[in-house]
Image (cartoon, rainbow, N blue to C red):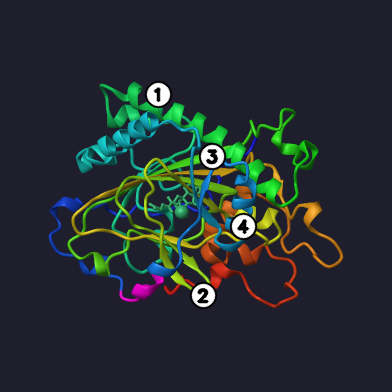
Amino acid sequence: MPSRLSDAFRAHPQQQLKHPDFTSLHELPDSYAWNQRDDPSPETFATESVPLVDLNDPNALQGIGHACKTWGIFQVNNHGISTSLLDMVEHTCRSLFSLPVHQKLKAARSPDGVSGYGFARISSFFPKLMWSEGFTIVGPPDEHFRQLWPQDFSYHCDVIKEYKEEMKKLAGRLMWLMLGSLGIIAKEDIKWAGPKADFKEASAALQLNYYPACPDPDRAMGLAPHTDSTLLTILYQNSTSGLQVFKEGAGWVAVPPVPGGLVINVGDLMHILSNGSYQSVLHRAMVNRSHHRLSSAYLYGPPSTVEISPHPKLVGPTHPPLYRPVTWNEYLHTKAKHFNKALSSVRVCVPLNGLGDVNEQNNSVTVG
Ligand SMILES: C=C1C[C@]23C[C@H]1CC[C@H]2[C@@]12CCC[C@@](C)(C(=O)O1)[C@H]2[C@@H]3C(=O)O
Ligand SMILES: O=C(O)CCC(=O)C(=O)O
Ligand SMILES: [Fe+2]
């Protein structure tokens, strides 16, 4: 049987935690109180900010290359995704998460499944709970959406379908910009991009996130520090800020929403493909006392059976391959088991400068 993305978690069933009705909580329960949040010093915010790249700019490729090398994350505008589509996706998210808890639970993610409503998958690695709800979509959302909205599920299915199609095109474009900035420019350099080099067979997951307003935001965590297991992720965030990224030497830096902009981050598979030139970025989401926050992450990777390895153009006698080949499915298994040690578990060779993976050092929370 062909291996699909949705099969990746069968071997790692997750116990479903009971979801609270956040609106009924007026105090932060102890199970949600994070002690060691490792907050940035106030001056951190002022000095550095994540680059913004205009995709219509003829120098976009250079801008992206620099951003990937120094930050592992950047924002884009003039990306071609219409504001009306982004508004519709936001409306679908809002409609989904404002359903009564019992209704949302009808579409709960099954313990060995990948799609559906639930806590963030990484929850099991942290001793405290996260102040958020999520909905993961892999493949067509029809069955779950029918449970959520018996009347108008087909409208919401259409919105998600169109969004996924548009995101896929943008992701393919971004892939060539990122690869181009590494000197990988020929169609033949990435065979799995297909005969038209349009990454038609790529696979992806869509993660909708909802962060309710929180009575004690300074002690809560919306989504704990993690890197995405992707080649790249395209994140849409509504007008409420909350995303932060970890930058060596600067600490946690906020990524404020840019109107009409999208956030692009480097994932673990791009880290591997680029042989560590573009490092996956550690990021987290914080919460807010007065405003709820919505985000949607398009998690983009290769077809699930394609092996990703350091690109031959980037390895040589002085640059040995640092990672062994892995499929996305295999990597997701590894991540489900080892979480922030996943990248080093597929490492084959210590780099010449002797530094470890950035991901491993910065998680202040003990991984179970
Ligand atoms: C294809 C993917 C990628 C997943 C797992 C699976 C479906 C859901 C994705 C996320 C989304 C939220 C953060 C993350 C860390 C999580 O907990 O679930 C992601 C994870 C990964 O990038 O590893
Ligand atoms: O909500 C955010 O800003 C971050 C979401 C995220 O990191 C994810 O879904 O992987
Ligand atoms: Fe993420």
Displayed quadrant of residue 60? top right
Q: Give, as a three-letter code, the residue at label 2.
A: Gly
Q: Residue, x 73% and y 59% (percent of image)?
A: 324
Residue 249 got which mark?
A: 2
Query: Where is residue 368 drawn, in percent x and y?
Result: 45, 70
Residue 204 got which mark?
A: 3
Depth check, front residue: 16 or 197: 197
Identify the mark nearer the N-term, 1 or 4: 4
Residue 66 got which mark?
A: 4
Label 4 CB sits under 8 Å from any ligand 3 atom: no
| Residue pointed to by mark 1 | 158
The alpha-carbon separation of the residues under discs 1 and 4 comes to 37 Å
User: Are the residues at dot 3 and dot 2 in contact (C-beta closer than 8 Å)?
Assistant: no
User: Are the residues at dot 1 and dot 4 in contact (C-beta closer than 8 Å)?
Assistant: no
Q: Where are the magenta residues, as a range?
A: 35-44
- How many numbered marks are there? 4
Q: Give, as a three-letter code, the residue at label 3.
A: Ala
Q: Tag 2, which secondary structure?
A: loop
The alpha-carbon separation of the residues under discs 2 and 4 comes to 17 Å
Q: Is residue 368 visible?
A: no
The alpha-carbon separation of the residues under discs 3 and 2 comes to 32 Å
